[in-house]
């Protein structure tokens, strides 16, 4: 931190003294500028590292989705069955929903079914707010599709994530989704007090 020097007044003020003060101030400004440039360089390096981390998370997300059938699905079914659902059908190969012309309308990562309920699970490494919005659209499409086939079972939604931010978790709960998080090598369904799943 620099301290300002008082400007001398009176007889002692000479051109040499003013010039020396000017030179000193200029050097201090150069040093400040150098520090700003160094800080800017460090910010750029940090930004580059964050982008690299995001890219790696993206790759991990793709792999995580591919492994959902083997790693996530059995744990999720077991956790829901502990809540009394007793699912007897677990579809894990990306369940596609088609319209009457055979055009794909949406795809669901994991579908759990029994005689009374269907739970559509979206699996993400790091769920984001837009993933929750997209899953709501999937569930509406699934409901329309099941209605056309006179399937009146209750449909619920769930979001499974390896890394869940608090904001995203809150948004999922507010949307009426079950929140499934990874704890070690198992899955855990987080159910806050008073939670009632949204029915589609």
Image (cartoon, rainbow, N blue to C red):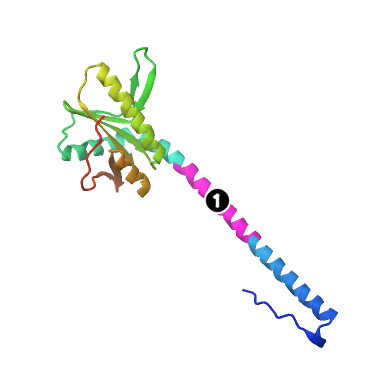
Task: Give me the residue at 38% from left, 21% from top.
Answer: 105
In-front residue for pair 180/93: 180
Element class at badge 1: helix
Q: Residue furthest right?
A: 15
* Residue 39, image quadrant: bottom right
Task: Give me the residue at 59% from left, 52% from top.
Answer: 44
Residue 37, position in %: x, y? 65, 59
User: Viewed as shown, does residue 42 lie left or right of 63?
Assistant: right
The answer to whether residue 154 is visible is: yes
Q: Which residues are magenta?
A: 37-57
User: Viewed as shown, does residue 53 lie left or right of 124?
Assistant: right
Q: Is residue 87 magenta?
A: no
To which residue does mark 1 refer? Answer: 47
Q: Residue furthest top?
A: 101
Q: Residues within 10 Å of mark 1 (few under 14, many from 20)?
A: few
Quadrant (top left, top right, bottom left, bottom right) of the N terminus: bottom right
Quadrant (top left, top right, bottom left, bottom right) of the C terminus: top left
Up-down: is 150 above or below 172? above
Residue 143, position in %: x, y? 28, 24
Task: Give me the residue at 81% from left, 83% from top.
Answer: 13
């Amino acid at each position: 931190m620099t301290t300002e020097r008082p400007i001398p007044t009176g007889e002692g003020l000479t051109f040499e003294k003013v010039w020396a003060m000017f030179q000193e101030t200029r050097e201090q400004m150069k040093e400040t500028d150098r520090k700003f440039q160094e800080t800017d360089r460090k910010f750029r390096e940090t930004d580059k590292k964050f982008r690299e981390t995001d890219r790696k998370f993206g790759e991990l997300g793709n792999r995580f989705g591919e492994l959902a059938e083997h790693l996530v699905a059995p744990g999720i079914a077991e956790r829901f069955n502990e809540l009394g659902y007793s699912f007897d059908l677990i579809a894990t190969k990306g369940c596609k929903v088609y319209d009457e012309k055979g055009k794909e309308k949406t795809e669901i990562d994991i579908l759990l079914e029994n005689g009374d309920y269907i739970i559509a699970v979206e699996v993400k490494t790091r769920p984001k707010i837009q993933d929750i919005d997209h899953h709501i659209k999937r569930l509406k499409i699934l409901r329309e599709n099941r209605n056309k086939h006179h399937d009146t079972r209750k449909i619920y939604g769930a979001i499974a994530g390896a890394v869940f931010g608090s904001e995203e978790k809150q948004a999922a709960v507010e949307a009426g989704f079950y929140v499934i998080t990874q704890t070690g090598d198992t899955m855990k369904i987080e159910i806050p007090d008073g939670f009632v799943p949204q029915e589609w």
